[in-house]
């Protein structure tokens, strides 16, 4: 029945679904009509494509998200939030199937997806708190200069701080995609700060791999140095 609302028949409402929730996207007809860029979402639940972008691929424009990593599932949940909060798109009901049972109750698969999304949100919040503790370095470079200058400001970052390479990985993140940034850390308290951060993350339910490493081009403890852009 949902397939009848893909915009081909303009006498019918223009509908799409995300994770089993059906929305009237008629106000966005220029995007969701058969001529629009999001036409692959119309008249179906193509939740998977909201992460992969495979709107035109029948194998990709499907409701199932099996095999997607936690970050991809989090992205789909963000899209659901977008439709839920949109000022013009209107929720019209639930699609019986993968995500909702006949009695409109969520399926085990939807509960699994939402639990994954909750983990993603918790991890993002933990990373944000970590970056507040280990503030990003200042940096400056020009197109002609092969190096980038990085430094820590005593007034903003704290006294006796120096640039380090911050590297963190937590369960649920892709193995080859840790979060990294140039951070400013008090030299004398570097090891203690690292241990404290790991302890706080463990208390939040994570088993992190966190490193604070001096850059090889920088003198340990010095607040300013230059590094090759290509490094």
Image (cartoon, helix red, strand yellow):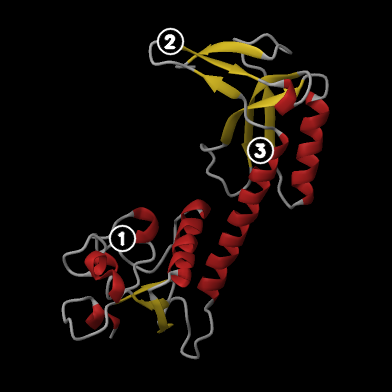
- Residue most extreme to the front: 155
Crowd rating for badge 1 (residues with CA inside 10 Å; few <14, some 14–19, many 20+): many
Q: Residue at x 69, y 25 (%)?
A: 184
Dot in front, 2 or 1: 2
On screen, residue 25 versus residue 192, left or right, reads left
Q: Which residue is mark 2?
A: 145
Crowd rating for badge 2 (residues with CA inside 10 Å; few <14, some 14–19, many 20+): few
x then y, percent, for residue 170: 64, 44
Point out the image quarter for the N terminus. Answer: bottom left
Q: Which residue is mark 1?
A: 60
Q: CA distance from mark 2 to mark 3?
A: 28 Å
Q: Is residue 67 above or below residue 187?
A: below
Q: Which secondary structure, mark 1?
A: loop
Dot in front, 1 or 3: 3
Q: Residue at x 47, y 56 (%)?
A: 75
Q: Nearer the viewer, residue 1 or 80?
A: 80
Q: Is residue 176 above or below residue 186?
A: below
Q: Nearer the viewer, residue 182 or 153?
A: 153
Q: Which residue is mark 3?
A: 131
Dot in front, 2 or 3: 2
Return the disc, 2 or 1, that comes first in the chain's sequence: 1
Q: Which secondary structure, mark 2?
A: loop
- Res 9 label: none
Q: CA distance from mark 1 to mark 3?
A: 35 Å
Return the disc, 1 or 3, that comes first in the chain's sequence: 1
Q: Residue at x 38, y 11 (%)?
A: 144
x then y, percent, for residue 185: 73, 25
Image quadrant assignment for residue 61: bottom left
Q: Nearer the viewer, residue 64 or 146?
A: 146
x then y, percent, for residue 207: 71, 45
């Amino acid at each position: 029945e949902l397939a009848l609302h893909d915009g081909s028949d303009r006498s019918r409402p223009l509908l799409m679904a995300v994770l089993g929730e059906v929305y009237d996207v008629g106000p966005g007809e220029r995007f969701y009509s058969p001529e629009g860029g999001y036409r692959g979402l119309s008249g179906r639940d193509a939740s998977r494509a909201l992460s992969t972008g495979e709107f035109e691929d029948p194998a990709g424009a499907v409701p199932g998200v099996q095999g997607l990593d936690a970050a991809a599932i989090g992205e789909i949940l963000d899209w659901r939030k977008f439709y839920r909060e949109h000022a013009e798109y209107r929720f019209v009901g639930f699609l019986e199937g993968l995500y909702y049972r006949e009695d409109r109750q969520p399926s085990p698969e939807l509960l699994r997806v939402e639990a994954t999304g909750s983990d993603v949100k918790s991890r993002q919040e933990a990373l944000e708190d970590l970056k507040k503790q280990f503030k990003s370095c200042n940096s400056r470079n020009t197109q002609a200069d092969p190096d980038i200058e990085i430094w820590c400001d005593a007034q903003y970052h704290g006294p006796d701080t120096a640039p380090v390479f911050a590297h963190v990985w937590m369960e649920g993140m892709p193995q080859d995609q840790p979060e990294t940034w140039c951070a400013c850390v008090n030299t004398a308290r570097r090891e203690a700060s690292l241990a404290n951060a790991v302890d706080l993350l463990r208390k939040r339910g994570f088993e992190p791999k966190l490193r604070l490493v001096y850059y090889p081009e920088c003198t340990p403890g010095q607040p300013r140095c230059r590094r090759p852009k290509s490094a």
